[in-house]
Image (spheres, rainbow, N blue to C red):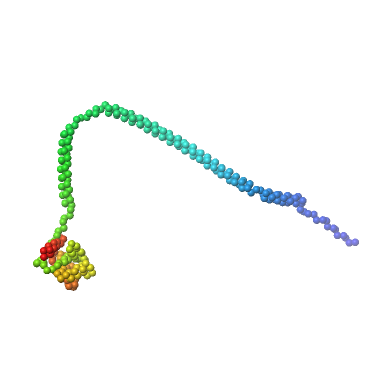
Amino acid sequence: MGRRNKETGEDISLFPFLSVLACVIGTLAMVIAMIAIQSLDNDTVDRAIEYQKKEKELEQGNQELAKLREALKKKEAELSSERSEEQRSLENAKKRLAELLAKLEKTNEELSKISVEGPKVDVAAQNEEIAKMEAELKSRREKIAQLTAQLQDRKSPPEEAEVSIVPGGSGVGFTPTFVECDEGRIVIHDGGQTTPVRTAELNTNPDFAKVLEEVKSDEKGTLVFLIRDDGLSTYHTARNFANAKGVRNGKLPVIGDGRIDLSYFKKQAKNS
């Protein structure tokens, strides 16, 4: 017979029983923990958290309260010191007041001993002296007024000189319009008004053009140029414009630098 093969034995599990038991216990513990967590009341958890929060706030409040108590003690000490200083000041003031009252009482006693009858005064002599002083004061005031007036006269500027324009010949038969010729300008004399015009603007100035038209339109009108020492060139320019417009014109010399006086022409115009 052939050799019989040796039968193999049963397989032995290497996983021990205690390990299986430990896994089962761990699983049960985890399940129990999950059930316990799920069964907890949410309100209870919130209250616990709020309690811890309030506990921390209370601790902080106690710390702040301790600081405030410390500051209060310090302030009380300062106030006590200030009250002591005020008390000393009050005592000094009372002492000073007592001294003043004593001095016032002493002064009143001294005044009561002084006779109210003073030396006799000569009223008439005093009145006479006062009258003399008032008269002297009046005289001095008049003198001051005179000196002030003299001073004002000295400060006032000198009156401007006048140059009178006297008409030549009879002066009858024409109506004069006067134009003063200075260096670089003319001055139109129209009644009591004076209008200056620069020589360079004679051809465009409306006032000069108006004067030329008025004189030209008047049958008796004559443009009289008053020529100053430095106005000869201006006269030639203005005369050329007048001649170009056909305006009758004449001339008179002006001797001096004062203001032109045309009163003689005005008087002659009234008398004619």
Instruction: Answer yes or no: is residue 26 visible.
Output: no
Q: Position of residue 147 (x, y in %)?
A: 16, 47
Q: Position of residue 66 (x, y in %)?
A: 52, 40
Q: Quadrant of the C terminus?
A: bottom left
Q: Residue at x 19, y 32 (%)?
A: 121
Instruction: Answer yes or no: is residue 206 visible.
Output: yes
Q: Quadrant of the N terminus?
A: bottom right
Q: Position of residue 207 (x, y in %)?
A: 21, 67
Q: Residue at x 13, y 66 (%)?
A: 252
Residue 78 vertical position relative to residue 172 in the rendered view, above or below: above
Which one is in front, 271 or 26? 271
Number of marks: 0
Left or right: 155 as drawn, with respect to 28: left
Q: Residue at x 54, y 42 (%)?
A: 61
Which one is in front, 267 or 262? 267
Left or right: 238 as drawn, with respect to 43: left
Can you name the residue that lies furthest to the top here? 113
Q: Residue at x 17, y 32 (%)?
A: 122
Q: Position of residue 218 (x, y in %)?
A: 16, 70
